[in-house]
Amino acid sequence: MRHTISVLVENEFGVVSRVASLFSSRGFNIDSFIGAPTNEEGLSRITIVTRGDESILEQITKQLNKLIDIIKVIDFSDGSGIEREMALIKVAAEDESRAEVLRIADIFHAKIIDVTPRSYTIEATGNPAKIDAILELLRPLGLRELVRTGAITIGRGAKGWAG
Amino acid sequence: MKMNGARILLECLLKEGVDTVFGYPGGTVINIYDELFSCGGIRHILPRHEQAGTHAADGYARATGKVGVAIATSGPGATNTVTGIATAYMDSIPMVIITGQVPTALIGNDAFQEVDIMGITRSCTKHNFLVKDVNDIAPIIKKAFFIARTGRPGPVLVDLPKDVQIASTKFIYPETVEIRSYKPTTGGHPRQVSKAVGMLLAARRPVMYVGGGVILSNAAEELTALSRMLTIPVTTTLMGLGSFPESDENSLGMLGMHGAYCANMAMTHSDLIVAIGARFDDRVTGKVATFAPHAKIIHIDVDPTSIRKNVRVDLPIVGDVRDVLTKMIKKVEESDEAVAAYKESLVPWHEDIAGWKSKHPISYTKSSSVIKPQFVIQKLRELSDEDVIISTDVGQHQMWTAQFFQFNKPRTLLTSGGLGTMGFGLPAAMGAQAAFPGRQVIAICGDGGIQMNIQEVATIVQNRLPVKIVILNNNFLGMVRQWQEMFFEKRYSQTCMELPIDYIKLADAYGAKGFLATRPDEVEAVIRQGFSEEGPVIMEFKVAREEKVMPMVPSGASLNEMLLNA
């Protein structure tokens, strides 16, 4: 089962590698891993998408909480979060396929951010399933390059993570 | 007053009450050693290898309950501490390890004796720090000691670049420490405690399964009190030995792979297991799928990650085991009238246990022609002081010590349980002896393990640490040989040491005394002779070469599938 976990961490030396090496040393999977500073000084947020059954998820959250530099672990497995991912997609577009690429981008509310006579580069945003869907449609036209950010998640409602 | 970073480090150690450190000088710690030269109040012991220095700090911590401190230089000095750090980490021993580092400007340049010790020790420390500013030394050392000894204890490494040691600033030691991301739960939840006592009083075949956590939290007294109030049988892990007197009638001894038959049978037939500061290690559970099939499980541990890691748990209690046990005792006292009836209801259970105990007690076949290693252990117990501290290496002699020595007091057995580190015994004994100069300290080793840190005989002689080294010499790597005999059709691949070592001459070369026993009737005389010497001693016993540790739960088998006879 797929789980999304957000981790609030002190912006200390080596904190990203602490979190990452916990996953590798304990044999937990990482589907995606993304981190950046937050609005609070000295605080970063890492979002990890992982896979495993309930007992593995319990171990992951407990082991993360045990790391000294970790302030809070939020498990969004219950669907309580809104998930977004961005993809930058370079797709071949020549002759008859140029119009098709534009149509697909339009359907997914994606933007064209670079254009050449032989290609379009598309910026697509949405939940990971939506990104998968646009990729599926673009793939037959010829994907030249793909960059995904991995998922980030924020909780629903008026409250921030600290409550 | 302004001080340099090296001096600030030493002042911090003094503030933390450190009286002994184990360290080895080198290029990037030379400034610390220069300050140490004029700093009173800290005894420095120079081991002959940084690994041994780290084990010695570990042994000091296990014997005293205080935080052990080790110092090593950058590069190879730092990497040599890694086995010692991992050993302490697996057994949750509080330690602070200070490593020198190349100057900050050179970090990452592959400088002379540079190694990324932060990266290397990330997965075997509770936490580690790189100090980049002299103003951070004091707050980081304060945090390091706090993290090492609180919650589930563990080793903390502080990497200190040379330029930070040289830079100066005003020394201010923080009075308090506050880490917003580190708040271990120590108080057991009262409602969970009530539930636990309710389950306990409803059980008819209860067992307390006790690990090193009881010793780490100094809860041996509370454990013993609770067991005696309700006559609940207690079995301990290797790390838990000493937390409950094995002389007590409710003691089942050690459980697990080489545990007592009665302990493993009690676990298998129990209807309630109260796990206290133990972590359901694979050497304890055997095959997890068939482990304690009839039992509900209460798990008390300060570390939430230990709970439900290996086995299902019916009632978790996160907290310091001493706090939880104290609350449980109070709760039992409140239900005073139920206690007498409860004890009565356990009589059939005690009868079952007595049956298992008498059916297959821990035993061995005696011999009058060849020295049995178990006999040596029994004689050591008989002839040693009541408060003797024993350390071991890893392997057969370690299991025989666990089975036959009979530990009655906490912090009297120092052994590498989790990591299983050969070479631990002598340096750990050295650390314990430094802490308790007046107590008897015995390192029980095999002929494999002793050679992994034999150089420390020099350290104990130089520092007048009268450690008594016992070598049970079978000229084999005995435990592996035992497995080869039992499971690999006696293909003794690389387990025979072949070259005989003259340990008596070796003792002499280091300036220690050496005594040798080759026949059973010499054992007692050698031990008496060794104990009567004031200084360090090596006592070598040529033991039965192919003796096996029995009983045994084969790897992957269930606890009730013990092999009983050699």
Image (cartoon, grey):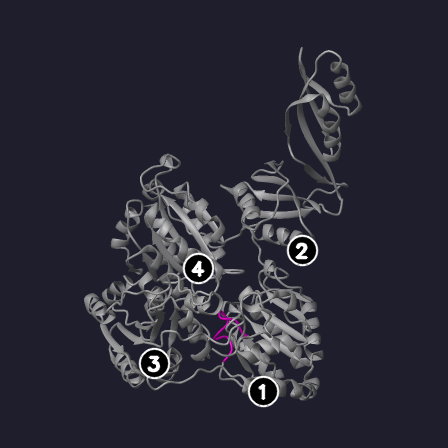
Instruction: Give the magenta-colored segment's residue range.
Output: B236-245
Is residue B243 in the magenta section? yes
- Res. B18 visible in picture: no
Q: CA gap, disc 2 to disc 3?
A: 50 Å
Marker disc for residue B371: 3
Give amino acid for label 3.
Ile
* Eye-nearest disc, 2 or 3: 3
Marker disc for residue B87: 4
Give amino acid for label 1.
Ala
* Eye-nearest disc, 1 or 4: 1
The relative height of residue B204 versus residue A72 in the rendered view (above or below) is: below
In the picture, measured across the screen, residue B371 lies left or right of residue B256, that is left
Residue topped by disc 2:
A55
* Eye-nearest disc, 3 or 1: 3
Residue topped by disc 1:
B354
Q: Chain of mark 4?
A: B
The relative height of residue A27 versus residue B52 in the rendered view (above or below) is: above
Q: Chain of mark 2?
A: A
Q: CA gap, disc 2 to disc 4?
A: 27 Å
> Disc 3 or 4, which lies upstream in sequence?
4
The relative height of residue B135 versus residue A92 in the rendered view (above or below) is: below
Is residue B193 in the magenta section? no
Q: Chain of mark 1?
A: B
In the picture, measured across the screen, residue B534 lies left or right of residue A2, that is left
Q: Quadrant of residue A109?
A: top right
Look at the magenta stretch and give its main secondary structure: loop
Secondary structure of residue under mark 4 = helix
Secondary structure of residue under mark 3 = loop
In the picture, measured across the screen, residue A98 lies left or right of residue B129, that is right
Do tags 2 and 3 sit on the same chain? no
Category of crowding for the residue at label 1, using alpha-carbon neighbours closer than 10 angstroms: few (below 14), some (14–19), many (at least 20): some
